[in-house]
Image (spheres, grey):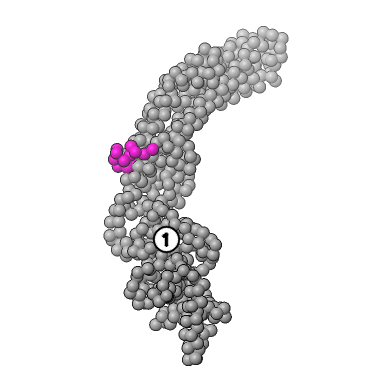
Amino acid sequence: MSSPLNDVLAGFSRKYRKKAKQVEPLIHKYLDEGMTPAQAVDKALKETDFKAYMTKAVKDAMLSSAVIGAGSYTAGKSTPLDEAWDPSGMTLSEKLHGTSKAMRNHIINTIKEQLKQGAHAMKSARTLYDGYNTTDNVVRKQMLPKYLQDVVNFSRRSDLGKNDVIALQKLVRKARRVVDRLAQNGAPNRALKTSYKELLDAVESCSDKALKRAIRTAVEEKSRYVAERIARTESARAWYQGFLKDTMDDPDVVAYRWVESTRHPTEDICDEYAKVDAYGLGPGIFPKDKAPELPAHPHCLCHYEKVYASEFVDKPELEQEYRIPQLGNEFSYFTHQGERFSTRRVMNSQYHIEVSDSVTLKPKMLHEMENQINESIKLMGIKDLNNFPTFVIGANNDLGGALGVYKPITNVLYINSDTLKRKAFAEYLKESKGAISANRLSTMIHELFHWKDAQEYIKRYGALTDQSRYIKKLCEQDEKKIDQLKAKGYNLYRISVYATRQLIMGRYDEVFTEYRTKILLKG
């Protein structure tokens, strides 16, 4: 699909070509006056005020792009064009300075190379002609191919028109034929002198033509590429900033769809962004806070389309099950077993859920988390949600491999993100010898039993401030219940491998919680 910036960038290219046509004849003029390439280029660029002109052209393109992205002039014009807004940390002025320097060097180096080629060809042709009336061996047949080949190479490598190349090589072939005849009669003749003179004049004429074409190529093509590179890249970035201003706080826009530019001759990261279904929303669709930044690379003209909630009307199950998590901007910090990690809150959940920055919370996972909480509340008969815990979804590394942890002092319930990947977790529970049940709710229910115990303790004894004291009290109570089960002949070692380990360690609170969870899930 064509980029929304095509017209803007076409306008930039027209401005560039207009200014380039002023620069080219001045460079040629100053070279004819005897200036070095660097002096000629610098004077031409200064005289045409090239740098200021290009800076304004780039800024105009960026402002127009920001307005297009934002959908209004008011929002678009607020985009900070002179601030560092990408990982490079460079301002636009700094980037433009580097671009101007690169363009200048492109022009100077191209001219130097052309002058070098032209001078070498002229030297070869002059040596041939000047050596005609001397006793020098330059006109010997075995020496001629080198000089003539230098001229041929010049015609091939120089920036000449097709007709000039043909004409120059025709003269080379004529000179060779004359030299061949010369070798037969052994003496120079008028035809040889004439052919050399024609070749010398042609090289001189073509050198001038080639130089003009080289200047045009350097200014209008090589340097234009550098200028358009920054114009495209920064305009795409400005469009993206404007697009974010227009859509980020719009509740009707729930996601962005990556639209690949038609300018993709080879496969790159953009192809992956356009095809990947990372969040269960469809190929190339990303939650607003998870969308990759634009541009993805220099010259990238891919863009985003808005994805509205109304697009899910024909898929009510998708809208219900795959609500996109909206994460807050503020960070919180939690610690487990000495490991500290940062989180952000899920703003569009009825519960207080924090997500570790090490976890990519997909819509399916958020849905599973809320379903586990809701189903557990119903199964456990929880009526009072006052002082309901803060839920923290952590990565496996955050939690030291634990599936779940409840901390009564802070009233925080940690859940391993792996337990929210429904199919994978079901397989794990099915194969795990240590699990009390293959039911996906086992971890959530186990930890919520711990939460219930803490709430009952608080009601009976007041604020919970000493965890060791609390655990000791809880174990004393639960040991009595465990003894009653033993007295009835209940085999405690069949609860779970985890319960057996905790029984040996005297953690009767964990044993009894495993027992309650197993009984509840077995109905």
Q: Nearer the viewer, residue 212 or 306?
A: 306
In front here: 265 or 127? 265
Residue furthest bottom in the image: 488
Highlighted range, magenta: 68-80
Does 74 lie within the magenta span?
yes
Position of the C terminus by quadrant: bottom left
Residue at the location (45% across, 51% down)?
Answer: 272
Looking at the rendered structure, the secondary structure element under dot 1 is strand
Q: Position of residue 422 (x, y in %)?
A: 43, 68
In the rendered structure, the answer to whether residue 92 lies left or right of residue 347 reads right
Q: Residue at x 44, y 78 (%)?
A: 517
Extreme residue toward the front, this view = 462
Kindly indicate the quadrant of the structure image that contains residue 371: bottom left
Q: Position of residue 198 (x, y in %)?
A: 56, 13
> Dividing the picture into quarters, in which one does residue 301 lie?
top left
For the question of whether residue 497 can be seen, the reply is no
Q: Is residue 491 magenta?
A: no
* Rendered residue at 48%/78% (across/down): 474
Left or right of 262: which side holds 200?
right
- The residue where tag 1 is placed is 354
Which of 322/338 is in front? 338
Q: Is residue 108 visible?
A: yes
Q: In the displayed structure, would residue 439 be above or below residue 260? A: below
The amino acid beneath tag 1 is: Glu
State the image coordinates of residue 77 (x, y, percent, origin top left).
33, 37
Q: How would you rate the neighbour count of disc 1 (Cα within 10 Å): few for under 14, some for 14-19, many for 20 or more?
A: many
x and y percentages locating residue 492 in the rendered image: 51, 85
The answer to which of 122 and 242 lies nearer the viewer is: 242
User: What count of labels does the image hold?
Assistant: 1
Of the 4 image quadrants, the one containing the N terminus is top left
What residue do we see at 70% from left, 20% from top?
A: 142
